Amino acid sequence: MASVRVAVRVRPLIKREKEVSAKVIIHMEGSTTSIDCNKKHLSKGTPGTGLKDRGRQSFSYDFSYDSTDVGSPNFVPQEKVFKDLGCDVLEAAFDGYNACVFAYGQTGSGKSHTMMGSPGDFGLIPRICEGLFCQISEKSQGDVASFRTEVSYLEIYNEHVQDLLTTKKSPENGSGLKVREHPKDGPYVEDLSKHLVQNYKDIEKLLHAGKAKRTTSSTGMNDVSSRSHAIFTINFTQARFDAELPCEMVSKIHLVDLAGSERADATCATGARLKEGANINKSLVTLGIVISALGGDRGGSHKGKRKKQLFIPYRDSVLTWLLKDSLGGNSKTIMIATLSPADVNYSETLSTLHYANRAKNIFNKPTVNEDSSVTVIRKLQEEIVRLKRLVEKNNQALLSPQDLSKTLKVEEKLHKNEVKVLELTREWTNKWGETQNILKEETVALRKQGIGVVMDSKLPHLIGIDDDLLSTGTILYHLKEGRTLVGRDEASSNPDIVVHGAGLLEEHCVFENRDGVVTLIPQTGALCSVNRLETTQPCQLTQGAVIQLGRGTIFRFNHPKEAAHLREQRKCCAVGYISNKEKTHLQRNASSTSSKLSL
Amino acid sequence: MASTYSHEWRAVCDKFNNAQDLSEVESRKDPENDPFRSKYKARELLREIYCSLKNFDVDSPAGSRAAKLGAVEYYLGVNHVETEELSAGEEHLMNCMTLLEKCSISPENVSLFIQVRNQLGILWAGRDEIEKAQGFLETAEAMYIRYMKEDGQPPMDLTEFFVAEEEALPQQERTKRFEMAYTHTLYYLAQVYKNLEQYEKAGGYCHSTLQRQLEFNQFLPLEWAINAATLSQYYITKTLYMEGRHCLSAASVIADLAGEVPSEAAAQESEAEAEKRDQLRQKRAEIARCWIKYCLNLLQDAKKLLEDNIGELDMDRQAELRATRLKEEEEKERGRKSAVLFGSSDTFDSICGLEEKVSCVFPVDFEEARAIFLVGQTYVNQAKEYFEMDGHVTDHIEILQDHSALFKALAFFEEDLERRCKMHKRRVDMMEPICKDLNAQYYLLVCRQLQFELAETYYEMMDLKLAVANKQDDLDAHTVKKFNHLCSSSTKFYQMFLDSVRSPEGKWPEKLEDEVLRPALVAKFRVARLHSRLISSSKTIQLENLNRSLECYNFVVQYCKDNPEAKSAIETELELSEEMVSLLPLKINRLQANLASSN
C-alpha cells in the first residue's frame, strides 16, 4: 500500500499583502491548481524557471485545497483536510504500518496553520494525535490491547542530525548523531532521546520545546527554519494477546517539516543533489555530483534494454535515509504544500508548486529486478502447442460422421489410456523423460498389462533388441509408407535408421512398406536374416518376425494391423489406443526431452 | 609605474590583499544571519581600488592599465555574483570584457581572459541560457589552447596585478594557478554539456578534469578516488570497460595515498582517529563496490552477447566473439588508451599493475568468466567488511545481491549442469537467511527483491535438476522429491512476494501500484506454471494442482480485463495465460473423468 498523496493548500490574502494591493494568482478547480504567470518575472527571466508558458501554468495534484475565502462555498476547512489525509494516517498506524506527513511551504504560506492550527481551529497534527489517543483509550477499555507511545524530535541541518529534545549538550565539534539501520527495527538515530507521552498535551509540550531549540538563522532572505529539516516521530506500540501469544506491533508516524529552501540541499557536501535547471556548480568539490549524474538513470528509457546496475558512491541525504521506511516501504505518505495566493510571492509559490509536482518522483522506489522469463515462456508455449493438438484431435473425433456413441467410446478409451500413462509416469521413473516425451508425441501408447508394460503403435514397426547387457532402453522404429533405409551414420545417403555394430554396411538394407505390406530388401553384400534364415533376396515380413542385420543387430518386426487381424481370428478383443498421427522414427533423443514433465 | 606611485601603489596593494582576505577567509566566519558581511566589506575596498586606479596617470602602457582595471571589474563582478546580485555582477564582468578588448593576449592577462569567461559561463548557465554559457567557456578553452601553443610560459596570476614586483609569484605557482583556472573551464564545460544532454562530451570533460587534478597535484586523495570510481560507472553504462577499469585502478591506487586506516584501538582513543578510520574504510569499501559492479556488468554484458534465444550459451556467437575480440582488441586499446591515462610517474606503475589483475574484454568461456568472477568476489568480501549487516542493512544486502548476481552470471558460462545448480544453491544460501531476518515493515522493497530473486533461483534450480536427471537416466523417487521441493520453494517465495502486496487485512488491492504491477502479475503467472509442474502420483493432488494453476492464470487474465491499462506491462504473459485459461479446463476435465472412472 505504499502510496504518496500530494496536496496543495492556498491560504487567504493576509493584511500585508492586501496593503500592497496584491492580486490573487492562484486558482483551483477540482484537483488542479493553476498560477497566473507574473509578467514582471517573465521579463526578468527568473533563474531556474525558464520562460515557459506565458499566461497560466497548471499543475495536477491528488488534492487542491482552496482556503482563500472563508465565505466561499468552496472553502476547505481544517476538518476536510484531516478527513482526506489524516484519517488514512491513523488507520495505517493502527494497522501496524508507518505513516509520514511532509509539510512544505514558504514561511507565511500557512504551513503552521495547516499543520498545527490554532485553538478552536486545530490543524492536522493535533487532530491526528487526538484521534490516536482517542482510539487508544477506546481500545484499552475493552482490554483488547495496551499501548505505548513515545516521541522523538530531531533536526537535520547540513546533513548533521541533532536531537531537539535532549537536555544533554551535543558534542561541540561532533558531526551530529549517527544514522544506522537495524535489520529488525529499521533505520534509527543512535542515541536519540525518546519521550513517553500520555496525551496530546504532552506532545504539544515537546513540540514547543523542540521548536525552540531549532537552529535559528535569518539572512535577509531566508527565514528561521528554511535551512533545516525537522522530523517529529511518534513511535507507537500496540501489545495484545493473539491466540494466547503475546504480540507486539510497532508503527511510526513521522511528521516532517521540510526545509523551505532547496538551498539546504545544494550547499551540503554529501548527499547533495544537483540543483534543478542549468546551474553550474562552481567549485570542484562538486565534481563528484556532476560525474554521478552522468551515469544516472537514463538507461531505463529504452524498453527491453537491460538497465545496468551501478553503484554511485554518494549517500542518500540523511533525510532520505531516515525516512526510507516511509518513502519506499509499506506506508502512507502525505505531502502538503502550502501556498500564498498573492502575486508578490510568485517565485516562491511557483517553486513550491514545482516541488510538490515532483514530490512523487522524489521518493525513489527501486522495484523488483525481474529476470527475463524467456525460458519459462518458451516452455509454456510448447505446452500450449501440445494441448492444442489434443483439442484438435478431440474436435476431429467429434466432427467425424460416426455415431455419437462411437465417438464417446473413443473419448473414453482416450481417457483410459491417459490414466495409464499417468500411472506409468509414476513407475517408469528410470526412463522418465524419454518415455514422457514419446507419450506426448502420441504416436505410441503404453499400457500396463499385469506387471508388464505394453507399447502399442498403429504403424508397422521394428523393436530394437539390444545385445548390450547394460542397456535398458527399448528402441522403436516406425516403418512408414515407402522406403526406410537402414545403414551406418557415415553413409552419404542419410539412412532413416542409423545402426551401429559389427558386420553392417553403410547402406545395409531397406524396409519397404507398400499398402501395409512390409518387405525387407537386403543391399548387395549385406548380411541379413529373417527368423534365422539368411536372405539376400527381398523378403516379405510377417508379425513377430525376428530380423538380424550384420552380426549382432536384432529387431523384432511388429505389424499391429496384421496382429489385430490375427487376434480377431483368435477372437481376442482389441485393446489400446491407436494414434492417427504418424512419425517416421522415434529415436531416443535425450536432449530434446528435457523437462517436459508437465503433462 | 609602481615606483612612481610607490606609496599610493602600496596602499592599493594592501587594500587588495585585504579585500582578498575578507572575501576568501573572513567570509567563511560570517554569521548565519549576516552571511555576506565580509563580502560587502571586500566590495567597498575593491571600489576604492578602482577609483584609485582611475586617478592614476596614464603613463603606463595602455594595455597594462586596462588590464588592471579589468581585473578590478572582474573581482567586483565575482563579488556581486557571490552575493546574489547577478545583474550587477554581469555588468562588471562585461566591463572587464570591454576593457580586455583593448589588449592582446599576453602572459600578463591571459589568466584574466580565461577567468572572466569562466565567470560569465557560470552566470549565464544560472539563467538557463546554456548556449550563451557554452560560448564563453568554449572561447576560454580555445584561448588556453592557443596560448599554450604560441607562448606557453607560465602566465601571471590575477592577484599579481596588485602586488609589488618583489612579491611576484614563482613560476611554479603561476603555472599551478593558471592550470587550475583552465581545469575549472573544463569542469564548467563538462556541466554545460551535461545540461545540454551531450553526455559523452560531458564524460570526456569530467575525465580531463580528473586527469588535470592529478597532473597538477590539486586533489584530495579520497575525494579524487571516489570521483574516479564514480566515473567508472559512467563508462560501464557506455560499455567502455577499458576506461572503466582504468578509472577504478586509479581510484584504488589514489585512495591508498590517503594513508593507513587507523587501528580500532587508536580509534577508541581519539575522536579524530575514529572519524578518519570510518572515512577511510567507508570510501575504500565504496570503491570496492564500484569494482563489483564493473565485474558484474562485464560478465552480464558478455552473457547478453553470447546467449541464444533461450538464454543458453550459443556456440556460434562464442566463436564469433572470440574472433572479433582478437581483431579489435589490439588496435582499439592502443588508440583509446593514450587518450585517457591517469597518473603521475609514481602512481602510474601501480595503476597499471592493478589493471592487469582483471580483464577488460568480454569473457567468452568459463575460465575467463571465472577469473572476473573471482575478482568480483574478492571485492564483495572487502566491501562487506565495512558494510556489515548490523548498521548498514540495505548496503549490506545490496552487496549480497551483487554477489548472487555474480554467481548467476558465472553459472551461464558453466557447462556442467550439476555445478551450475550448485552455484544457484550458493545464491539461495546467501539470500534465504537474510530474507527471513529482515523486517518487511522497514525494508519492504528489499524484502520483495529478495523474495523474487529467491523464487527465480529456485525455479532455475528446478529446471536444472530436471535437465540433469533427464541426461543421466536416473530420475528416481529421491529426484522427484527434490524436484517437487524446488518447485514448492519457488512457489513459496513468489507467494511471499504476492502476500506483501496485500492489505493489512489480507485483501488484494483492486489496483496494483505501478511499481509492483508487473512483478506481481509475473509472480502469479509463474505460480500458475509451477503448480502444473509439480509431480504427483495422486490424481486428486494432480487435479488440485491443475485447478490452482488455472486459478492463477485466470487471475492474470481477469486482472487485465478489469484493468486494461495493465495489459501493456505484461503482454506476452497475458497472451499465454489467456491460452492456458482456454486449454487447461480440457486437461482438468479429462483428469476428472479419469478420477471418476477409476473410482
Image: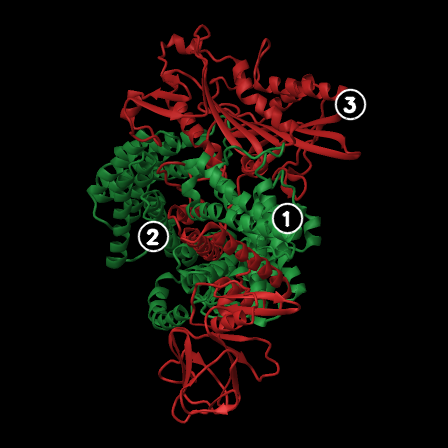
Residue furthest to the bottom: A525
Tag 3: residue type? Asp
Q: Residue at x 44, y 37 (%)?
A: B561
* Callout 3: chain: A
Question: Which residue carries the number 2 mark?
Answer: B200
Please provide percent x and percent y for residue B415: 52, 70
Locate residue B433, reporting x and y percent: 67, 52
Q: Nearer the viewer, residue A594 or B220?
A: A594
Disc 1 and disc 2: Cα gap in Å?
A: 40 Å
* N-terminal label among 1 and 2: 2
The colour with which the image depicts chain A is red
User: How far is mark 2 from mark 3, CA to CA?
Assistant: 66 Å
Q: In the rendered view, would you say B410 is above or below A91?
A: below
Q: Is residue A67 above or below residue B45?
A: above
Establish whether labels 2 and 3 are both on one chain: no
- Which shade of the palette goes to chain B? green
Label 1 Cα crowd, 10 Å radius (few <14 / some 14-19 / many 20+): some
